[in-house]
Image (cartoon, rainbow, N blue to C red):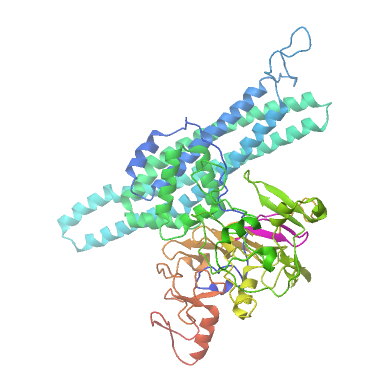
Amino acid sequence: MSDISPSSSPALASASSASANTTSISTNIISQSPSSNIMTSTSSVQTKRLFAECALVEIIHLHDCLRGALQQINRDVDSLVAAATFIDDEGRESEKKTSGDEIISPSSFDINVASDLSNSVASRFHLIWSVFQAHSGAEDEFIWPALKMKIESKKKTRSDGNTSDSTACSSNVKKETSSGDKKCGCESFLEQEAYEEDHAEEETMFKQINTTLRRLNGSFRFYHSNRDPRPTALSIIKKVILLLKEQTDQLTQHLTVHLEKEETQCLPMVKKHLSNEEISELVGNIMGKRSAELMGKILNLAVCSLPGDERDDMVRCLKKAMGGTFFEKWLTMGGWNGGEEGKLKRKRKNSTASEVDEKRSASPHAMHTHATGAAHGISDDEASDKPKKMPKFQGHITDARMRNPSRYYVRNDESGNELIWNSAVAKRTGLKALKCVPVFTQSELTPTFEFSESRGAMVLGCEHYSRSCKLRHPETGQLFTCRLCCEEIRQSNTGTYESLPVLDRHAVSEVLCMKCGSLQPVGKNCVNKDCEAADKPFAKYFCSICNLYDDDETKDIYHCPYCNVCRKGKGLGIDFRHCMRCNACIGMSEYETHACIPQRLSGNCAICKESMFESTEPLRGMKCGHVMHLSCYNEYAHRSLFMKITCPTCRKVFDNMRG
């Protein structure tokens, strides 16, 4: 059993108990306001009007993002060139000085400023490169094949119609065919070859710039390594900067022409031959291979490159294209707020225990931490992200020996972590501060271990996950190694935990480091600088949306931005694709042949009647498209060992064990 939902596929048995990937957040949007002078193509404006109600407008928005990013990277390179003009041909820095040693003009080459500019160029360049690779790959893999298939289908239909017409009518149709569709089909094939050549040429340009940026970074290191050869290093830096300027100008010119050609030739051709339904399916196929990381990069590009109104329009179109999925929920939980601020929209309120006591004191079921020995939880008061209220925990902890964590950190208004309790200096802590510190039983504070088969040793964690932290229940304030451990206790129906509510992993706001005992806000690493694992992650994989940690090196996990859950697998576009109609992740090998059923995982298993969308059990798909738990399927098939198997949902008959 695991916290990871298995990906939906006709061979869903591969999705067994597991945990999630290392994307701490799907949309960590950077806070950079785009310049008001964004480069917008005339063709882009015209094409955007033409495709206003068409799913292809998403591609136009992406073009505008790339144009804006290219304009900004050119500005940074121009700043580098301007700085390099203060280096003479012999590698000496030129400065204007008075008769004394005082510099009257700061206009000189600053190696630190140049290095910062170089890093800015490199980060923006790699963002553009990764997004453009996905864009050009989608064009080669989806758009041109779909267009070619549609044109050939039309030609075949027209040809079949010609054979049954009269001779005169046939002659007229053949003339139209030869002058129209045949020409278009031939042109589309030639255009495809031209675009593929452009993509190959642009990839070469990207690689050349990447090499130049690495060389420039090496030149800065050479400059700092030794004072003696600095004139030589400065001369090299100047030459590399000028080469970078030449290469970025060439790439910008080539990409500008390429994007213009797409908007005036390729996309109108797609709209002409494909219906709106076919275009929507085409865009859905493209988006289904975009991972959460890639979608985060595209949104980063939008924040940096588009004005607010265009950015909002782009996100609106993305939501429309991904209708029927949980993409909008992923945006909200991931922190998307239109890019106006760099802070996450969902701010986790780390209320102290005393604040929680004050909020709950009016309730007849309110419990006081120090009075009854029961630990309180911290709730999330944000209305937009507030989890559904669970019944308050009414059990009684038998272990009355309550203890504080070794340290207690809370998130302050600046989104930093502030230490408010340290057991090492407890005597100097005031009574008011002590009341804010949660208390736990000794068993809660004690680290838990599990045997790792891959490592052949005991490691921190539980039978479900390897991890070095515990989750604090958002309702009761108790500590559990994982939500499944909490669920097992709930299912045991013991008197102590009789009313224990479900541990909502999305509402968890605090974790306890099992190595140093520090209670702290949810994060990837332990914030205690004195911890033996300081600055090391709690687990190899951390998802800040699902609050999922797993340190098992044998597991591959990813977060799907359309399912908005973590699933087992290498990722979208690698071994899975998301089907927008099914709203499920399908294995790449089965995607083309899977039977598409809208919202195929939204119902319950036909055998056990339990939910399947976020199921921690492996799933099995059948040829009819319906899905059930693998264990349910095996039991169901075993009962029908010597007879035909029928789908319990649609009653379609299958050969025995060949569902």
- Magenta residue span: 508-527
Question: What secondary structure prevails in the magenta region?
Answer: loop
Any magenta on residue 510? Answer: yes
Q: Is residue 422 left or right of residue 324?
A: right
Q: Which x, y percent locates residue 354? A: 65, 56
564 or 135: nearer the eye? 564
Relative height, residue 616 to residue 287 (above, below): below
86 or 165: nearer the eye? 86
Relative height, residue 399 to residue 435 (above, below): below
Q: Is residue 430 left or right of residue 16?
A: right
Q: Which x, y percent locates residue 144? A: 42, 52
The quadrant of the rendering that contains the N terminus is: bottom right
Visible residue check, residue 13: yes
Visible residue check, residue 570: no
Relative height, residue 531 to residue 304 (above, below): below
**Farthest residue in the bottom direction?**
642
Q: Which x, y percent locates residue 233? A: 76, 28
Q: Which x, y percent locates residue 28? A: 58, 48
Any magenta on residue 254? Answer: no
Q: Residue at x 77, y 25 (%)?
A: 232
563 or 421: nearer the eye? 421
Q: Residue at x 61, y 26 (%)?
A: 79
Count the marks: 0
